[in-house]
Image: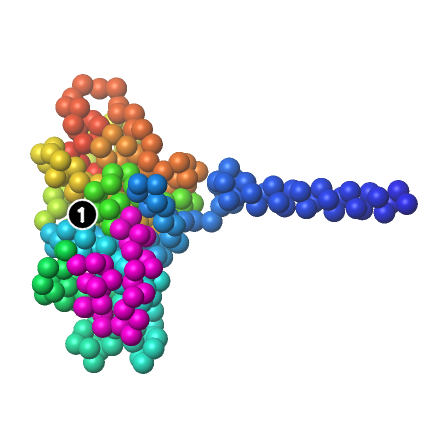
Amino acid sequence: MRRRGAVVAGVVVLALVLVGGWYAIRKGTLPFLAPDQCTAEVGGHAVVLDPSQARYAGLVAAIAVERGLPARAASIALAAAYQESDLHNLRGGDRDSAGLFQQRPSQGWGTRAQVRDPVHATNAFYDALVEVDGYEQLEITVAAQEVQRSGFPDAYADHEADARALASALTGNSPEGFSCRLGDSDDGSTGLRASGLTARADAVRRDLLARFPDLPLGGFAPGGVSTGHVSGSAHYDGRAIDAFVRPVSPANRSRGWAIAAYLVSQADRLAIRTVIFDDRIWTAGRRSGDGWRDYEPPERSGDPAILEHRDHVHVDVF
């Protein structure tokens, strides 16, 4: 009888441990067990994405920023991508459609390879959207339908709230609105490329220039840098880049937050470890679940705008 009671008690304890562990993971109190995910939170509305969805959402928003389009355009594009592919770059679908926006080559979006290229597909969507008269004032579901010509035109409305929050956070209109909880990355090569950056950091440099072609970059040089930064800086290892948004102004602050949010959205893909902007810091790994935190500038004399990273976005890789 005692043995049966001990077994029952053991089962109960195990169940409590499992339930407690599940609850702790859901609440983020055991971050090392929690799944990787990204969150946009704006005005009390939260949107949770997996890292793959975040990558494409960040791309869609960054292309809108690069083209000088309003956040409204990004909202419309994100609502369409949500409805058509759940923010995934699908290989194929209904009637041979494919890609982020589930289009077909016969619809004039290019070859099948172009339809599946998220950059080309997103630009094609925006090309069509800007041809819609007064799209900025149209309801999102109407504007999206003008581009997509879907058989379910009312469905875009189901994603409007999420698309608005994502667009606001990812275009820099809601600072600190987007962050990701991600684990550490594995070790990478420490050798320097011709740019003076490691392979990973150089991939970030090339990615930034592809998304924001006119963005001034610095903090690195052929052969590496050895001065100008605090002791122990990732810049000295060729692992860091500064993206400048000068002079400090409301418009450049929004642009800086758009760049910072884009980098966080791509952190899983590019092995990004740290992003700093506007006196705030995000780091992958153990503290990533804390989102954006206060940044503590180094104890040294200098321009506060530079020390607090208000005129540039710092990014470094593992």
* Foreground of the two, 47 or 150: 150
Report which quarter residue 113 is drawn in.
Answer: bottom left
Write down the region rendered in magenta: 138-165
Q: Is residue 279 visible?
A: yes
- How many dots with numbers? 1
Residue at 52 percent across and 43 percent down: it is 25
* Foreground of the two, 66 or 168: 168
Q: Secondary structure at mark 1?
A: loop
Where does residue 35 sit, x and y in percent of width and height?
47, 49
Where does residue 40 sit, x and y in percent of width and height?
33, 46
Amino acid type, callout 1: Ser
Q: Is residue 2 above or below residue 154?
A: above
Q: Is residue 312 above or below residue 163?
A: above
Please tell me whether residue 86 belongs to the stretch shown in magenta. no
Report which quarter residue 84 is drawn in.
Answer: bottom left
Residue at 18 percent across and 32 percent down: it is 310
Q: Is 157 on the left or on the right of 32, as rendered?
A: left
Residue at 21 percent across and 64 percent down: it is 142
* Foreground of the two, 116 or 270: 116
Quarter containing the N terminus: top right
Where does residue 225 sit, x and y in percent of width and height?
19, 36
Residue at 63 percent across and 46 percent down: it is 18
Please tell me whether residue 163 belongs to the stretch shown in magenta. yes
Q: Which residue is mark 1?
A: 195
